[in-house]
Image (cartoon, rainbow, N blue to C red):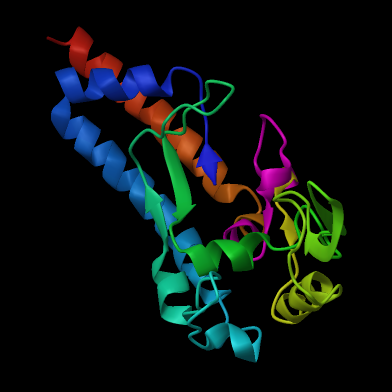
Amino acid sequence: MPTEVKGALELRKALKQFTPDLAKETQKELGNLLKPITQKARGFIPGAAPLSGWGKESATARFPVWSSQAAKRGIGYKTTPSKPNRSGYRALARIVNNSATGAIYETAGRVHPQGREQVPMAMTYNNQGATGKMIRSGNKNQSNSNNPGAGKQFIDAINKNGLIVDANNQTGAGRRSRKMKGRAIYRAWYEDGGKTNVAILKAIATAKLKFDAQVSGR
């Protein structure tokens, strides 16, 4: 959940180089602004696994085992610049989700609301022709479950705990993205109504004014 502003990265570098105390003050202020959103997002994480089987260990399953504690702990904030995305944008302040189960809960069904299509069966062949053996043959965007309705059942169960919320209209000026939709972080951002986004931009603008005043007064 990033907040972006032109020149913010350059300002941060200048603050660290010429006014380190102001740099620390600004980072602390940004953290204090993001903390309530982070705490609210953690509150949207269910206290138990959305599906009973999700909370059980399995010797063969590759799916991460649900942990409410880990999912909540995985939601945090950063006030250091992110790596550039494909478009070259970097976030100066953002809320992040570092938990695998938390990320699944946040986004499951965002791209495929009815669950992913099941991988189709395909005949295998050898030098003599068809072997009579069928295997699943598809791509990573398809489900390998033997249950054709598994994806929908999984998403329906998660939706009982919280629906995906579109936070695009609460980001202020800037780009819109399908990635601005989710059940915890993006719901918290949506319910904030854009107030934190405005406050962050104001804090950065204030830091710029303080920086200019301190540097010009030397």
Indicate left or right for 189 with 212 as reference. Answer: right
Q: Tell me the quarter of the picture where residue 20 sits.
A: top left
Query: In the image shown, does 16 or 110 lie closer to the viewer?
Result: 110
Q: Is residue 3 above or below residue 36?
A: above
Please provide percent x and percent y for residue 47. 53, 86
Q: Which residues are magenta?
A: 169-188
Looking at the rendered image, the quarter that the C terminus falls into is: top left
Query: In the image shown, does 149 or 165 lie closer to the viewer?
Result: 149
* Identity of the residue drawn at 33% across and 37% down: 80
* Identity of the residue drawn at 50% across and 60% down: 37
Residue 184: tell me if it is visible. Answer: no
Please provide percent x and percent y for residue 41. 53, 66
Q: Is residue 92 above or below residue 162?
A: above
Residue extending farthest to the left is 218
* Identity of the residue drawn at 66% across and 86% down: 51
Query: In the image shown, does 156 or 95 lie closer to the viewer?
Result: 156
Q: Tell me the quarter of the picture where residue 87 sits.
A: top right
* Identity of the residue drawn at 46% across and 61% down: 38
Residue extending farthest to the front is 128
Does the stretch in magenta take in 176? Answer: yes
Indicate left or right for 162 with 133 as reference. Answer: left
Does the stretch in magenta take in 97? Answer: no
Query: In the image shown, does 155 or 197 lie closer to the viewer?
Result: 155
Please provide percent x and percent y for residue 125. 81, 51
Indicate left or right for 48 with 138 as reference. Answer: left
Residue 52: tell me if it is visible. Answer: yes
Tally of numbered discs: 0
Please provide percent x and percent y for residue 25. 23, 40
Q: Is residue 196 above or below residue 63?
A: above
Q: Is residue 141 above or below residue 216?
A: below
